[in-house]
Amino acid sequence: MVPLAAVRGALPMNRPLIIGAGIAGSAAAIALAKAGERPLILERSRETGDALCGGFLSWATLKALNQLGVSPETLGGHAVGKVRIHAGGRIAEARVPAPGMGLSRHRLDTVLLDQAIQSGAAIERGVAVRSADATGAETGDGATLAAPALFLAAGKHGLRGHPRPAPGSAARDPVAGLRQRLGAGPALAAMTGDAVELFLFDRGYAGLVLQEDGTANLCLAVHKSRLAEAGGQPERLLEQWRGQSAALAARHDAAKSLGAIDAIGAVPYGFVAPGSNPDAPWKLGDQAACIPSLAGEGMGIAVTSAISAATSWQNGEAAGHWQAGFARRLAMPMAAARTIWWAGESPRITALAVPLLGSMPAITRGIAAMTRVAG
Ligand SMILES: Cc1cc2nc3c(=O)[nH]c(=O)nc-3n(C[C@H](O)[C@H](O)[C@H](O)COP(=O)(O)OP(=O)(O)OC[C@H]3O[C@@H](n4cnc5c(N)ncnc54)[C@H](O)[C@@H]3O)c2cc1C
């Protein structure tokens, strides 16, 4: 394939290009701008939305954000001190290793992008990139931009030439991500409190955490075979899960309002970009790896990959070499996250494990620590 920079008429630039103004893209822009570069972000949406995400920022993610100059006080989210696990009527609770935060993606993405612009980055909105390699990008309207480095931070969205195959159970039985916004209410605040709550079911889970304004995101990850048993209808699946968990039903009923259910299909949980391809761009965030969302570390990977890649590029390292090293760094937390995800969606295992976790909270704390990448 011809490198995009060599395409006749390619617009040469002396600034690094970043595809996507989500967490990874903005974090990379901040890191690069602070190091004296003038990165340009290309973002396909015209406004910052509220991405489909649980909104739980782990203590390790907060630490990584702090390295970029974004302090927890600036973010102003809802403090999270506990993890509470519900399965088959049993409950296990443990303190998290250090305080985390519940925060809407609209707020986080806005703060990060503002910081990137203040640090010297530029953004062009409404530009959808069609293809990208190590040397540049081709936009949807056919323009080609050549850049000294290209950071691919397109998140959940696929880009031609950069497949993200899911391994294991997510390949055999793909996983959908769903989100319903719950309106703020005192009863919901009293029930969930300062916990991130996980409700475990056969072939899926729901996660809940309060955000900065008392609203909550109820996020579901569910295998398609299970969704099919609910007629392929997320509303019916939620109704069935409410029937199996009085705690989930109580929180759902306590919400002031219930939003529509948004969905993304086939999240490639367990994918890790292997690296070592000299023609590939620097792949960040969900393009670098997709950790099972039950672990609550996807945003940590986004920030950490961005800081690490920006530093490595500045130090003259090759993208493929860095990517392979980052994949090695992910191996342990990813294996731990895949194991707890596999265990968490098997009712026979959770029937034994949740009472054990209830009596030995140190195990939950240990697992929470093992699944961190950031920090
Ligand atoms: C159900 C669910 C719940 C989750 N809950 C949590 C949680 O509680 N905690 C946690 O840490 N992680 C969670 N995650 C994971 C987390 O949401 C992701 O890891 C994180 O959003 C990755 O950030 P990113 O910057 O890589 O991508 P994104 O945030 O998806 O940003 C990508 C950006 O690129 C833009 N873009 C895409 N394609 C193009 C293109 N072709 N041209 C130009 N721009 C483009 C998009 O518009 C977007 O702005 C969850 C994931 C799911 C599916």
Image (cartoon, rainbow, N blue to C red):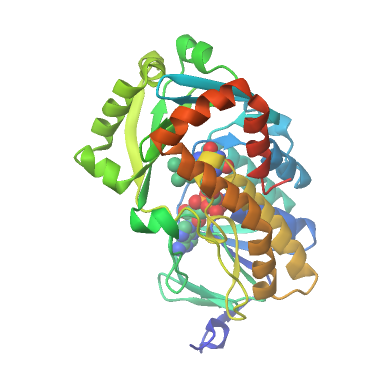
Residue 16 x %, y %: 66, 69
- Residue 321, relative to residue 78: is it above or below? below
Label count reads 0
Rendered view: 212 above or below 116: above
Q: Is residue 57 left or right of 47 when viewed as pictured?
A: right
Q: Quadrant of residue 279?
A: bottom right
Could you say which is closer to the camera, residue 321 or residue 134?
321
Task: Point out residue 231 in the picture as x, y percentages from the top left corner.
Answer: 19, 40
Given the current orientation, which residue lies at the most extreme left position? Answer: 231
Residue 355 rendering spot, x and y as whole percentages = 52, 23
Residue at 38% from the left image edge and 59% from the top image edge: 171
Residue drawn 41% across the image and 19% down it: 89
Name the quarter where the C terminus is drawn. top right
Query: For the point 57% across and 34% down, which residue is it?
Result: 56
- Quarter of the image holding residue 221? top left
Q: Is residue 209 visible?
A: no
Q: Between residue 328 and residue 356, name the one nearer to us.
A: 356
Of 263 and 170, which appears nearest the observer? 170
Q: Position of residue 119 (x, y in %)?
A: 73, 52
Q: Is residue 55 visible?
A: yes
Residue drawn at the location 58% of the way across and 27% of the way down: 357
Can you tell which quarter of the image residue 278 is in?
bottom right
